[in-house]
Amino acid sequence: MDQELLDQHRQELRRGTVVLACLRLLERPGYGYGLLEELAARGFDTDTNTLYPLLRRLEKQGCLTSEWNTDEARPRKFYRTSPTGRALAAALGDEVAAIAAAVAALTQEDGR
Amino acid sequence: MSTTERVDDALADRYVAAAVHGLPARQRADIAAELRASIDDQVDARVAAGEEPREAERAVLSALGDPDALAARYEDRPLHLIGPRYYLVWRRLLRMLLAIVVPCAALGVAIGKMLEGASLPELLGAVGSVVVSAAMHVAFWTTLGTALVERHRSSSDDDLPRWSLESLREPEKRTGGLPELIAWLAFLAVAAGAVVWDQVRGWPSPDGPTHALDPSLWPWWTAGLLALLAAEGVLAVLVHVRGGWTMRLAAVNAGLDVVLILGVTWLVVQGRLLAPDLVERLPVEVLDPTTLAVAFGFLVVASAAWDAADSIRRALRA
């Protein structure tokens, strides 16, 4: 298969799941770069210039809360999932599971 | 692994300044500090992995991309002039306005110039420049208006004209069939007969026979007009036989119409279309001879232009 084609579709498919991944990961407070690394390690490749505006938007929507941590030499803005964000993550998680089940059912029918 | 190792701090500072420049003042400091910390984190990670500090910073900033694009993402501003939400509305509006405004402007200017008694090149120049400027104005203001709406849209869809099944086009009949052909041929024959009669015999009036068209058009201009009418008739038969307009037939038709338009325009400009004594002999006091000739000429030109456009439109739909 054409690698470029695959990448394009995969990126499209995964784009929506980054929000869910962020909401889940930020159950433990995290800051931009740390989150970026963790997302990458778990297979959610996200560009820096996408992640930061996304965090701001989620914060504006009330799904994340933020706090500056100035304990260390480099001050960092820490984000944390709010109760609203947790509810959203649960709903999105159900949705992803439903999609996975529906796709699995398609594959099975195909095999008959 | 500390920032003091880096040599070109100014670059990161400039990047951050550029990115937050257009943002609302109360967010600016916060976003700048976060962005700056993130850049430093990323650069440190690369340096720790063995990269040269200056190179690492350049790589990180390059990956962040155009600061204006980043700022737009922070603000959720569109990075297009007109997006999918308004594009079709814009296109329909633009086409409709161009189709209405440009011909009206051209016609208005042409009539004005003719009444002024302008020469043909002067008239064509004036019409050409008004066509260009009218089209540019229509395109510019339509686009500007739509782009502004795109940037200040409400979240509701209510202001948009909704598409519905009713807006589908009715399928168009390709020809009007035999009755239309016969009516058209009859009209052409009557028109040709009237022209010949007008030139040869004239119409009865108290002061003797009156000609509507300038008698000096006989024989060559008259013959040309009759040839055009005959060609229109042949073309109508061909269209009927083919079962509709084809692109080639439409092109021939448009060619005939252009010849007619040019001929009539030329005669009007030369003051040779209508008989010189026509106005005096009309039973009612009407307009001056020039106005009458211009009005008559435009009637012919407008119908010819419409005929050409209509045949091309039908060929395109077929």
Image (cartoon, coloured by chain):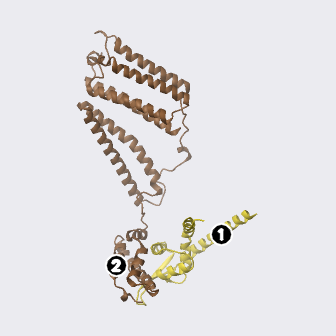
Q: Label 1 belongs to which residue?
A: A100
Dot 2: within a 10 Å radius of its alpha carbon, few (fewer than 14), some, or many (20 or more) residues? some
* Residue B284 in view here: no
Callout 1 amino acid: Ala
Res B74 seen here: yes
Kind of residue at disc 2: Leu
Q: Hey, which quadrant is residue B230 in on the image?
A: top left
Answer left or right for A82 relative to B201. Answer: right
The residue located at (48%, 34%) in the rendering is B248
- Could you give the CA–CA distance between mark 1 and mark 2, rounded to whole angstroms? 45 Å
User: Mark 2 = which residue?
Assistant: B11
Side of A55 where B145 appears, left or right: left
Along the viewing direction, whichever of B56 and B261 lies nearer the viewer: B56
Chain ID at mark 2: B
Q: Which mark identifies residue B295?
A: none
Q: Chain of mark 1?
A: A
Q: Is residue B26 above or below residue B294?
A: below
**What hue represents chain B?**
brown
**Picture residue at 35% right of the left edge, 41% below the top:** B102
Residue at x 41%, y 16% (from the top left corner) = B193
x and y percent of residue A62 in the render? 49, 74
Q: Residue B296 at what x, y percent from top left? A: 33, 25
Residue B201 location, quadrant: top left
* Residue B132 image offset from top left, x and y in percent: 32, 44
Q: Colour of chain A?
A: yellow
